[in-house]
């Protein structure tokens, strides 16, 4: 469409607005005349549009569409998976208490500025990165919005799918990898709950992607962030060092040591945190004292009852909903 056709379309739309206003103020005759002029200009604009379409080379349009459609497969798949994960997050009941405990620590940090778990004292076992991020989300959307944390985890899961697609190497391999990961029940379960695992996996995969592109500094930063998110990252990075070290011993490859340099700062951070705070030791001790039969018998019901009791209190008056959830 040329400039004249665009001007005709604008005048025609302005005439419709004028018709609506004249009828609202009781001037039907003026509205009738305005409507006639509006229809005339809209007819001229539509005629210009038809003439423009006749000049389009549809073969060129078809060739461009065939070139663009394959590139849209991955975004379309990610969009569908995002909608599916959001739907699962809205209908799936919480299978364990971790979502409520993570929410409790983040809410306590957002309201009091203290990074601790007043109910189970899990701050000596769970690392702080996820709770700091969750506290920022609760600051924006409200203290009681545990659904906002679940939505955040869904977005982290989608970001993980994107990084997985980039790591695959080719479009076909990426689509297969994304589909297999998205259909993994553990991925669906963790990506729709308020837990730290989606952030942990995203940071580790991003570190690997950056290292594969030769951006060792970026990889080291993301590896350190992963070490601040969960002790599982410590084990994973340690396995990376073992594998690369075995390759170096077998093949005597001089490049193997350089490829693993980005892991060193994260491992140093992990060792420092273990020596100072003992996160891994506390995690092992809690796992040894954990009773599966007791958890299976009452985890779901106790989690729901705690959340309902927390909801019945007003945070500013109670100071911390953990006291109300814990009971006398």
Image (cartoon, helix red, strand yellow):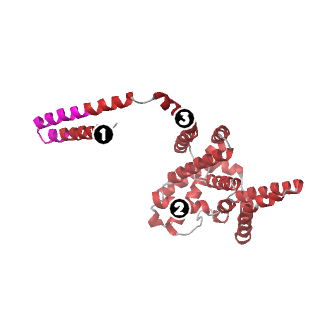
Q: What residue is disc 2 on?
A: 135
Q: CA distance from mark 3 to mark 2?
A: 40 Å
Label 2: few (<14), some (14–19) or many (≥20) C-alpha neighbours in 10 Å? many
- Label 3 element class: helix
Element type at mark 2: helix
- Identify the residue shown where x is 18% and y is 34%: 37
For the residues labelled 3 and 2, say whether their Cβ atoms are less than 8 Å apart: no
Foreground residue among 320 and 234: 234
Percent x, y of residue 296: 67, 47
Residue range of the region highlighted in magenta in the rendering: 20-42
Left-right relation of 151 to 185? left
Residue 165 vertical position relative to residue 47 in the rendered view, above or below: below
Task: Determine the image quadrant of residue 286.
Answer: bottom right
Above or below 13: residue 103: below
Residue 325 part of the magenta segment: no
Alpha-carbon neighbours of circle 1 within 10 Å: few (<14), some, or many (≥20)? some
Q: Is residue 315 visible?
A: yes
Q: Is residue 21 magenta?
A: yes
The N terminus sits in image quarter: top left
Q: Is residue 44 left or right of residue 226?
A: left
Give the x, y percent position of residue 40.
21, 32
Q: Which residue is mark 1?
A: 6
- Asked if disc 3 and disc 1 are in contact, CB closer than 8 Å, the reply is no
Q: CA distance from mark 3 to mark 1?
A: 30 Å
Q: Residues within 10 Å of mark 3 (few under 14, many from 20)?
A: few
Look at discs 2 and 1 and give the one toward the viewer: 1
Which x, y percent locates residue 280? 73, 63
Q: Is residue 288 visible?
A: no
- Comparing labels 3 and 1, the label whose residue is closer to the camera: 1
Determine which residue is flagged by label 3.
69
């Amino acid at each position: 469409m040329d400039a004249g056709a665009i001007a005709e379309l604008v005048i025609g739309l302005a005439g419709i607005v004028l018709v609506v206003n004249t009828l609202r103020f009781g001037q039907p005759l003026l509205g009738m005349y305005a409507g006639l002029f509006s229809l005339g200009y809209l007819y001229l604009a539509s005629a210009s549009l038809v003439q423009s379409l006749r000049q389009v080379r549809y073969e060129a349009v078809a060739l461009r569409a065939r070139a663009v459609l394959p590139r849209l497969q991955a975004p379309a798949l990610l969009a569908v998976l995002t909608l599916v994960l959001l739907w699962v997050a809205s209908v799936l009941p919480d299978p364990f208490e971790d979502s409520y405990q993570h929410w409790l620590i983040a809410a306590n940090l957002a309201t009091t500025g203290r990074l601790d778990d007043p109910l189970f004292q899990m701050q000596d076992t769970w690392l702080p990165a996820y709770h700091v991020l969750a506290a920022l989300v609760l600051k924006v959307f409200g203290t009681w919005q545990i659904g906002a944390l679940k939505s955040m985890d869904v977005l982290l899961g989608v970001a993980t799918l994107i990084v997985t697609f980039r790591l695959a190497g080719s479009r076909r391999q990426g689509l297969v990898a994304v589909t297999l990961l998205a259909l993994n029940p553990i991925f669906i379960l963790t990506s729709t709950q308020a837990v730290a695992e989606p952030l942990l996996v995203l940071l580790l995969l991003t570190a690997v992607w950056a290292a594969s592109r030769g951006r060792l500094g970026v990889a080291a930063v993301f590896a350190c962030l992963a070490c601040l998110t969960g002790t599982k990252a410590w084990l994973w990075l340690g396995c990376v060092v073992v594998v690369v070290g075995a390759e170096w011993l077998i093949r005597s490859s001089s490049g193997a040591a350089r490829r693993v340099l980005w892991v060193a700062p994260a491992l140093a951070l992990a060792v420092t945190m273990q020596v100072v705070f003992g996160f891994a030791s506390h995690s092992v001790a809690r796992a040894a004292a954990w009773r599966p039969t007791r958890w299976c018998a009452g985890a779901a019901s106790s989690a729901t009852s705690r959340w309902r009791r927390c909801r019945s209190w007003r945070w500013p008056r109670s100071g911390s909903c953990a006291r109300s959830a814990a009971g006398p």
